[in-house]
Every structure is written in structure tokens, then in C-alpha cells.
Image (cartoon, rainbow, N blue to C red):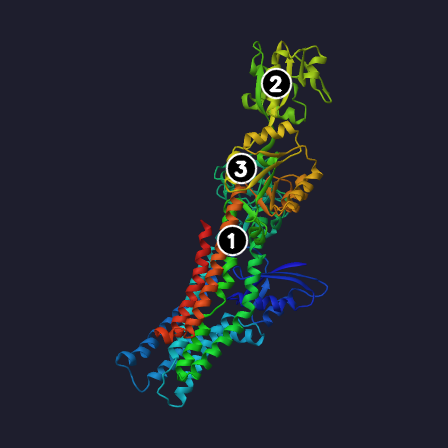
Amino acid sequence: MNQKFKVTGMGCSACVAAVEKAVKATDGVTNVSVSLIENAMTVDFDENATDNQCIINAVKGAGYGAEVDTGIIAKEKSKDKSVLVTRFLPSLILLLPLVYLNMAGMMGWPYPEKIHAYIQFVLSLGILIINRTYFDKGIKSLIHKAPGMDALISIGAGVSFIYSTYLLIICSNGPFFFESAGMIFTLITLGKALEAGSKAHTMDAIKALSELMPERVTVIRDNEERTIGFEALQKGDIVLVRTGEGIPVDGTAVKGNASIDKSALTGESIPEEAYVGDKVVSGSVVLDGYLLIEAEKTSTETTLYGIIDMVKNAAAKKTPIERLADRISGYFVPVVGGISLLTLIIWLAVGKDFNFALNMAISVIVISCPCALGLATPTAVMAGTGNAARHGILIRSAECLETARNVDTVVLDKTGTVTEGELNVTDIVTDSSTDEKKMLLMAAVLEAGSNHPYAKAIRSKALDMFEPSDIMAHFAKEVISIQGKGICGNINEKPFFCGNEKLLNDNDVSVEALRAEASALQGEGKTVLFFSGDGMLGLFAIADVVKGDSKDAISVMKEAGLDVILLTGDHKTTAESIGREIGIDNVISEVLPEDKHNKIDALMNEGRHVAMVGDGINDAAALVKADIGIAVGNGTRIAIDSADFILMRNSVKDVAYVFSLSKRVIRIIKQNLFWAFIYNALGIPIAAGALYNAFGITLTPMIAAACMSVSSLFVVTNALRLRK
């Protein structure tokens, strides 16, 4: 069973490691993935060996909170930020007089000499009580042998306070470190408040999509309007959506018409018209009009629910880089503790007094924090997947982003990928005595009862020029469809023929007058249908039209250094013609569906990193085999389920964007990790006093706390650049 949980109390990657360790130790658990940025956990477990409550108890036993995640609308972040701000303001009020009393003696300011130390004790104690959650979590993490950030700052502030209290009890004149204890907790809390706000922005895309899921919807039951909860929607319900409301279900319009905005799903800003019989998807917004929609899926099976779930899951699945960072974080706190103790011993050994040595040791503990390391990857991944979602691109996992940046070869399926996937009449050619519009009208009448794709293309072209009533005014009789040749019938008692050259030759109709035009069109990969009847002679050229942005998209990919290949089952002439039109030189044609997988395998055996782009059932095996599978959004369900990326806008230009985005995300992750490592590599030695003898530079615990907060803010803020 796969179950999602909400987890509270995590502050850094060490916390993540602690939660994962505790849950993995539970009998029956096979896999655990914890997301720091979402405060969420996904667990795979055997229902016969354990249950949700056992897993929750394991998390609580590690010192954190957990509950089953029953929904996907994320509103917790703002609450977390509010709690942190609530703690920060009282702490600041107590800190200001504490700092004044500490500085008063050094600056010669007036202060109540006899009782100032006791006042500092009370003020500092107040700050520690307000922020006691750090002690709660820190002590629990130490007990469970999985110390994290809370343990570090608790030790730093706690040692400062306890040592100062000891000096106060023995009537010493100090110096005291009460202000260090208060300043550490106050600055850390401020940093956490700012960090929570910044982290919340990385979830903006999910929140925007979640807001499209109404809490209440209007349904028609027993011929009456009823308002029910969104989660109560069932397949078969008739849902009423008015102007300005979001469409909550996937279904078919059974009444009404409306202009709908699908930009939240596809990024396409141009509204679409929806009429009776049209399919509509959840997440669209009715701009004008109304629709009665028959729900075809339950509330948890809709397109919108799936999109949000996929975006969230992308962040939950860790990249190899993130897994490495998590492993390092597991050793981070014990190592820092050792360095802090060693710092204390060394400074005492070289003759420095205990207060100086303790100050250095505390600074080491406070400045070092695995927060930046833990946030480096998930913030970038969440911001990147959110950016992709706004562009109509869905990412199945974070690992896909890392793999995509290594792609050097892009294999494109033709039909439905670089082309529209539907046959269209591209050219109409007639002899000198034939009226083009009349020929098209008669051809549509002749093909009116046929379901052949060529017939649909002719009827569609006719409807661009004529009203349906114009076509229905005529009627074809004795219509015969001849396999491999075409169709014939009588209109107004006159014979008409539409098909290949053999059909017309069999009926003593010569096409020599159109031979040159037909050959030229066939050379472009188009299918030619000849038409004759009532003295008319002409032809229709039919083809799957190339998408308008395919050529530009392929040009962008080639400029980026990608080798682009067209892979299709079409005849060589047709395939090469399409290739020339869109700028692809490497065309592999006449490939059977079952051989697409083998072609991808052969390319990968050459040492290439391959991305496969397709939309059909026959592309599914190739999509799975390739390093990266990319499915266009109007593809079959099996193709979409087999892909790593889904392009909701059905646009090839989004393929190029996938590779561009993956490189940006990985670049940001590397920048964040570099900063996290450099910060600790430089900060810890400086805090330990490495520059003291040469330059007289030391860091107080207050400065160390400020540096730690800034390091985390840098990582989160850097990741937010991916939102643009």
C-alpha cells in the first residue's frame, strides 16, 4: 500500500533523516520518502504487517508529529509562518532590554548594577521558554540518536544559559552569556519565519492549482439544484458550472455552452468554446455562459487532482544529488559536535580562559547547520516543477530533471507529435472547366455517410466553406465503397467517383490532365484522391499537417546541440517530406510499432542519452525504454502513464523547454549545494577561531546565529529564481 502523511516539526535534512530512519525500522515498511519542503512523507508498506497508526507512532517516537494526508490543498505553510512570527515578536521584546543591559556595562551606560545580572537571567529565561520547542525537538532527536538543527541550537543556547546561571549562583561577576542564549533563539526564529515565507513561494504553483478545486459544487439531483462537498462528487453526477466558476470535474457537456479558460492547465491564454457533446476537464474556468456537465470521474480521479498530485510527487522523489546530501547530513551533527568540543579543548590547552574557549565552542555549534544542505535540492525541484506546471508541463519525478540534462538525442514520433494527428485537405486542384467549390460540395455529399479518415477530411474542409444545410440539400444514392480504391455513387442521377487513379481508370475516366500536379503533391508525401462526375475533374491532396511550431522548436533543439531524429511508420517518401519541412535530416521511416523499442535500444547502445517523444499506444514501450519519455497531452492514457514528462499543450516547443528547465534546475541545485558546503567549510573554522591569532577575528554566538539564518535564506531565495 502507498500512503501519504503530513509531518510536523522538521527543520533540516537531519530531521528528514531521523523520520526516515524511524519509519524504515517499522515492520512491513518497504520504502519511505520524506519531503522537507512540503513537510510530507510517502510510505510503501505491507498492510498485513503494519498500518497507518504504527507509522504515525514511529514518527512521533522520533520526536515529530504525523497524520494521514487526506487532501492535497496546501494551506499549512502560512500557518507555520504565523506561528514563527508569533514567537519572534515576544522574543524580540524581551531581547531589546537584554541587549541594553549587556552593552550598558561595556559602553559606560547607566544600569542597575546590583540586579542587572538577575534581570538578564529573567529576560533570557523568558526567551527560552517562548522558544522551548527547540529544546523539545532537540532533546528528542538526541535521545533517538538522530540530532539535527534543533539539537545544535539547543546545545548552543542551553550551554550559554546554564553556564551563565552557574556563574550567577556562585556570585561571580561574569562575564555572562545570557544575551547569547536569547539572541541565538531570537535570530534563529526570525530566520525560520523568513524561510517559511520563502519556502511557501516555491509552492505557489500547487496552491494556484489547488484553489481551482472548489470546496462546494452544484449538482442536479432529482431535478433539483443541490450543493455538495467537492469530495462527494461521483461518476455520473450532473454538475452545474456558471460564469466565473471553475469546472470541478472531467466530463461531457450535456447542456449549455460557454467560453472556457484552460490556462491554468496548459498555459494557453486563448479561451476555447465548449458546446454540448464537448469534453471538458477540471481546472478550466467558465468565462462566459454556463455548462451542465456529466462527471466521468470521481473527485480524486480528475485531471486537476492528478496534476497536483504529480507535481507534489515530483518533489517527493529524491534526485541522486539529494540522496547524497541527505547521507552527508546524517553525519553532519555528530561531526560538528566533535569539532565544537575539540575547539574548547584546544583553546584551553593554549592558555585561553574558559569563557573565551566556551564562546568559540558555542559559535561553532550555532554557525553550523544542515538546513542549507537539506533545502538545497527540494526547494529548487519544487520551484522548477511549479514553473513547468505553469507552462503546461507535468514532471513525474525529480530524478527525471537530473536525467534530462544529459540527453543528447531526441527521437520524435511523427503523427500527433510533430503533426496535428488528423488528416486535412491541404490542396484542391481542378482542370480548367471545373469549379473548385462545387467539386468540394459534391465530394462532401458523396462522402457524407463514410467513416473513413479521408472522408472526414473532405467533410471538414467542406464545412469551412459551406453551412451543413448546403451539404444536406443534396443526397447521394447507391453509394459503394470499394476496398483499396475509393467510393462511388449517384447524385442527382449522375455518377460520381472519388478515390485513387485505378478507381477512375476502371470507370473510363482519364487523369492525365492532372498527372503533373498529382506527382508533385505525392512527392511532398501527400495522399492524392481524384474526383470525377458531372463533367468535373479534380483532385484532393490529403495529409497530416505539421504543427505550426514544430519547425521552430526543432531549430531550437538543434541549436542547443541536440541530435533530432524523426521515427515513424510512414512510407519513406512521406516521412522524408515531413522531415524536410520541419528541418530534420535524420529520418527513420517504415518502422513497425513493435520495432520502435528496438530502435531506441540501438541508439542507447551507441552510448547516446535518448529522449523519446510520442503520443500513441505504439510509443509506450519506446517511452519506457528511453532515458527520458515525453508524452504529448492529447496522447493515449498508456503513453502518458509511460512518460516522465507530459506536455499538456501538445506543443513540440515545450520539448525544448523541458531540457532548458532541467539544466536550470540542476544548475541551481549545484549552486545551492556549493554554497552550503562552502559556507560550512569556511564558517566553522572561522567560528572556531582560525583567524584569531593572525587577524584577531572572532565570531560571537549572536553573529554565528545570524550567519546560519542567512545561509538558509540564500538557498531558498536562489531557488525562487526558477519561478521566472
Question: Which residue is more in the foreground, 695 or 173?
Answer: 695
Residue type (three-letter) at the residue carrying disc 3: Ile
Secondary structure category for the residue under label 2: helix
**Classed neighbour count for the residue bearing mark 2: other residues with Cα under 10 Å, few (<14), some (14–19), many (≥20):** many
Pointers 2 and 3 in contact (C-beta within 8 Å): no
**Disc number for residue 666:** 1
Sooner in the amino-acid sequence: mark 2 or mark 1:
2
User: Where does the N terminus fall, quadrant-wise?
Assistant: bottom right
Residue 115 in picture, x, y percent from top left:
33, 85
**Seen from this angle, which residue lies furthest bottom?**
170
Residue type (three-letter) at the residue carrying disc 2: Ala
Residue 390 in picture, x, y percent from top left:
50, 46
Sooner in the amino-acid sequence: mark 3 or mark 1:
3
**Classed neighbour count for the residue bearing mark 1: other residues with Cα under 10 Å, few (<14), some (14–19), many (≥20):** many
Residue 90 in picture, x, y percent from top left:
39, 71
**Disc number for residue 518:** 2
Residue located beneath label 3 in the image: 554
**573 relative to 92 in the view: left or right:** right
